[in-house]
Amino acid sequence: MRAIATGVEKFAGKISEQKPLLDEFGQPDINGTMVAVEHKVYALKYYQGIPTALQSKFAAEPLLPGFLLKPYGALLGYVLILAGITLVLGIATRTSLFIHGLIYISLTFGLVLINESGGVAWLAIHMLLVVAALALAQHNRFALTKRW
């Protein structure tokens, strides 16, 4: 579920709209004061695989090939959603877990290079869970495809 939620969050954006300021009784302010209210929305046009704050850090890192950043960011959200759905449905469980492991390894590598220690710790926990799930995959009774 974490991979699905993370993948869907890649499509999150914010829109701002003007609404009247309400007084303590819930009525519009008599002066007609307006305030900007932001709402979180999800749409394809808001897709961003790599957050803007990290893009410049990754681009400045010499060990990351710059030509791979754009395709990686373009595919990351979709791959997370697809891998998460296949895992939840029990389709090719081992392959799906392997893909999760590759995703987390690549994310960890990037975060190590830009010195984001907090994110590395979280990803290490995810990696441990993936390794444990792979070790126990042979006992999965709910898998739709047992072979992969």
Image (cartoon, rainbow, N blue to C red):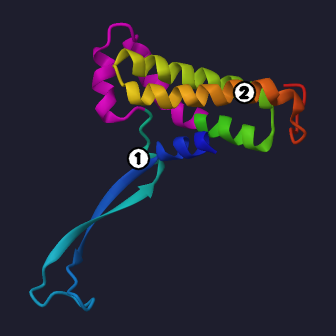
Locate residue 116, reporting x and y percent.
36, 25
| Residue at image coords 27%, 89% | 26
Quarter of the image with the C terminus in it? top right
| Residue at image coords 31%, 34% | 52
Taking depth in this image into account, of 126 and 44 the one nearest to the observer is 126
The verdict on residue 66 being magenta is yes
In this rendering, which labeled residue sits more in front, label 1 or label 2?
2
From the viewer's perspective, is 30 left or right of 3? left
- What separation in Å lies between label 1 and label 2 (alpha carbons)? 34 Å
Numbered label attached to residue 148: none
Locate residue 11, reporting x and y percent.
46, 46
Q: Quadrant of residue 56?
A: top left
Taking depth in this image into account, of 35 and 127 the one nearest to the observer is 127
Locate residue 129, reporting x and y percent.
66, 31
Amino acid type, mark 1: Tyr
Number of numbered discs on residues:
2
From the viewer's perspective, is 80 left or right of 36? right
Q: Secondary structure at mark 1?
A: helix
According to the picture, the residue beneath numbered tag 1 turns out to be 46
From the viewer's perspective, is 13 left or right of 75? left
According to the picture, the residue beneath numbered tag 2 turns out to be 132
Crowd rating for badge 2 (residues with CA inside 10 Å; few <14, some 14–19, many 20+): few
Q: Quadrant of residue 88?
A: top right
124 is higher (above) or lower (below) than 85: above
Locate residue 54, reporting x and y percent.
33, 29
68 is higher (above) or lower (below) than 78: above
74 is higher (above) or lower (below) than 47: above
Q: Which residues are magenta?
A: 50-79
Which comes before the other along the chain, label 1 or label 2?
1
Crowd rating for badge 1 (residues with CA inside 10 Å; few <14, some 14–19, many 20+): some
The verdict on residue 115 being magenta is no
